[in-house]
Image (cartoon, grey):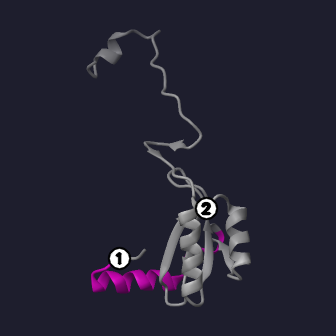
């Protein structure tokens, strides 16, 4: 079907929209958090000092994520099951957690990214 064939059908004919499931947003599928993500987050906290958690809300292109930032700005971000789960996870790990939509992202993370970019490498 060419582009102009859509207009030749007449005003009474409508094209149907494709069905979407709950995990499909836009042209990508959102992958759910899994045990590998959770293990990575726990390992990051265990192997770095001064880690803080920043819970990022669900968006049109990603699920709820937990951003962990160490004292020097090193960071990692992984999907998590829910906002409540992320705060509970941080509490269990004795790590402070904040809502990123309220407090923002720490400057030390941006500084870390700038240092890495100048060195020619990227973050996690």
The spot of residue 72 in percent (x, y) is 49, 90
Q: Would you say residue 98 sits in the magenta stretch? A: no
Q: Looking at the magenta stretch, what is its main secondary structure?
A: helix
111 to 61, vertically: above or below: below
SS at circle 1: loop
The magenta segment is 102-122
Measured Cα–Cα span from mark 1 to mark 2: 23 Å
Q: Which residue is mark 1?
A: 122
**In which quadrant is the N terminus drawn?**
top left
The answer to which quarter of the image holds residue 15 is top left
Which residue is painted at 54% across and 65% down in the image? 37
SS at circle 2: loop
Other-residue count near label 1 (Cα within 10 Å), few / some / many at <14 / 14–19 / ≥20: few
**In which quadrant is the C terminus drawn?**
bottom left
Which residue is painted at 60% across and 76% down in the image? 42
Which residue is painted at 40% across and 80% down in the image? 113
The spot of residue 23 in percent (x, y) is 56, 43
Q: Which mark is residue 80?
A: 2
- Does residue 100 appear anywhere in the picture? no
Quick check: marks 1 and 2 in contact, CB under 8 Å? no
Relative to 55, 70 lies left or right = left
70 to 87, vertically: above or below: below
The spot of residue 57 in percent (x, y) is 62, 60
The spot of residue 4 in percent (x, y) is 28, 18
């Amino acid at each position: 079907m060419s582009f102009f064939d859509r207009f030749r059908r007449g005003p009474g004919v409508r094209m149907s929209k494709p069905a979407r499931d709950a995990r499909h947003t836009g042209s990508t599928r959102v992958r759910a958090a899994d045990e590998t993500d959770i293990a990575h987050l726990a390992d990051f906290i265990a192997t770095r000092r001064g880690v803080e958690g920043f819970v990022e809300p669900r968006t049109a292109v990603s699920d709820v994520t937990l951003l962990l930032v160490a004292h020097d700005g090193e960071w990692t971000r992984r999907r998590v099951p829910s906002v409540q789960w992320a705060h509970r996870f941080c509490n269990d790990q004795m790590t402070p957690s904040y809502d990123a939509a309220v407090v923002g992202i720490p400057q030390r993370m941006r500084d870390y990214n700038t240092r890495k970019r100048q060195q020619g490498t990227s973050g996690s």
